[in-house]
Amino acid sequence: MRLFSYTATWCGLFLYAIATSTSLPSRESSAVSFPLRHPPNGPTNKRDIPLAVEGLVTIWGNNYWLKASFGTPPQTLGFILDFEPSNLEVIVSNGMGVPCSKDTYCELFGSFNTNESTTFHTLTYTEFIQTGDKYAYTDTFTVRDQVVKAMPVELFNIEEDSANALGLSPTNISFPYLLVDRGLTTSPSFSLCGDGGGTNQASILFGAVNTAKFDGPLQAFSLQGSHNTVSFQTDSLQLLTESNNTATEPARYTFPPTNLTLEPRSAYSYLPNTTLQHLYTDLNITMVELANDSPESSVLECSRQYTEKHTISLMIGNMTFSVPWDELFIPWTTDGLCQLAIQPITPGAYASGRGQLGVPFLRRMYIAIDYDNMFVGVAPLKQNPGSDNIVEIGTGPEIPDAVGEWPASVTAYTPAPTRTSTGGPVTRTSTGGVARGTGLLAKRELSLVVGFAGLALSQGI
């Protein structure tokens, strides 16, 4: 039966290869529409540690997008960063999907044409078996000036709201682990620097932290028992209201320490229901049932984002992360009603009732994640950062410039032998206690926030 399964899978891959090899028009270029407006590459202020890979990130539509390229010659694409899956997902323009011009994400962030890459490789049947049927294709993946050859990839046709995505999960086949395999970083780790809510330009640094970017030290939380998610604890909110340019006394809403999963692809934050009911009452926000038998959601008039001035802050230890409430309005109906992007945790609803922290708060944070010691550190962004100070995240039990209840020792991930030719399987095993992936992951649908649809136009895209 197992052989039959492999044979059936491989037959499907063979038929797909035939379909994608058919002569089609050239790929629709993303060079003009790609909404990344970072300055061109140039000398960095300080980079004493070579084992780090830096990527440019744009925050658009309440998603974090990494600018990278795939194939040879490089085809520039945008990849949604996702902390949950472990794979690289690429949408293809020479498949059987809709035209790229018919899909917003594809038109802005590009699609991949397998026919135009000289290094695109379809695994042989034997190679496919050797991977444990984890993936069937590889190609060259380039992040800024760092090249990763024979990068495993899953291909998808262009569909509504489909997009390229890079998985960064704790599972030991994700991109942070692959960088260790290739000798580009020392540990499976990365840090994500937000934009503070203003420029839409962020960055990611694999294998290191940039201490010049945050007001340290980082407050570190253990990821043990987090079920392969990236999360930390918080216990209170604060509401500051201004009227006639005069601030009132802040109201504080406390709740039991709650794990919040970090979600770089959603505007929504989910917090304890009882606490939010007090917040909604003070803000005169109504709870309504969006659909039959669905959980109630907070709804208010969209016009209030212009007529009232509030600031909602999340408290984590002695740190405060504040968001103007006009960034928390999500259009809901065509007659002027919006949802607030802070919703109650509801058992059986989104993500099985877990807490979540969305992009409006994340973009005001510096976050460092180390999968060797299974810790995440967080700190406020520095308002006026000086010259870069990039410090490698090594194989020890601590994250640089962070405080936490560190383990006495850790078992560091051991790089596995890797083939870096244009083809061939890339297999890895972990000695660091992180579970291995169990197979191909289904494509995840995107949550396009309608309120940000005009951002591309405002940036002159």
Image (cartoon, rainbow, N blue to C red):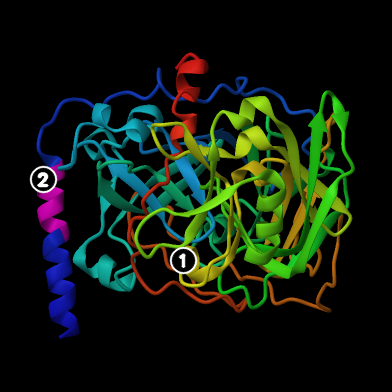
Real-space Cα separation, disc 1 to disc 2, in angstroms: 39 Å
In terms of image quadrants, where is residue 201? top right
Indicate left or right for 210 with 334 as reference: right
In terms of image quadrants, where is residue 373? bottom right
Q: Under tag 2, what secondary structure?
A: helix
- Residue furthest to the top: 460
Place of residue 348 in the rendered image (x, y in percent of width and height, measured from the top left): 46, 72
Instruction: Pick the quarter of the image with the N terminus.
Output: bottom left
Circle number at residue 104: none
Q: Which residues are magenta?
A: 13-20
* Labels 1 and 2: the sequence-earlier one: 2
Residue 1 located within the stretch drawn in magenta: no
Name above or below for residue 143 compared with residue 182: above
Residue at image mark 1:
349
From where the camera sits, is residue 460 visible?
yes
Residue at image mark 2:
19
Indicate left or right for 306 with 212 as reference: left
From where the camera sits, is residue 207 visible?
no
Residue at 28%, 66% in the rendered image: 127
Type of amino acid under label 1: Ala
Secondary structure, magenta segment, majority class = helix
Indicate left or right for 335 with 119 as reference: right
Place of residue 277 in the rendered image (x, y in percent of width and height, measured from the top left): 66, 59
From the viewer's side, name the closer residue of 152 and 159: 159
- Residue furthest to the bottom: 1
Indicate left or right for 325 with 409 as reference: left
Type of amino acid under label 2: Ala
Which is closer to the viewer, label 1 or label 2? 1
From the viewer's side, name the closer residue of 383 and 440: 383
Place of residue 126 in the rendered image (x, y in percent of width and height, measured from the top left): 23, 69
Q: Under tag 1, what secondary structure?
A: loop
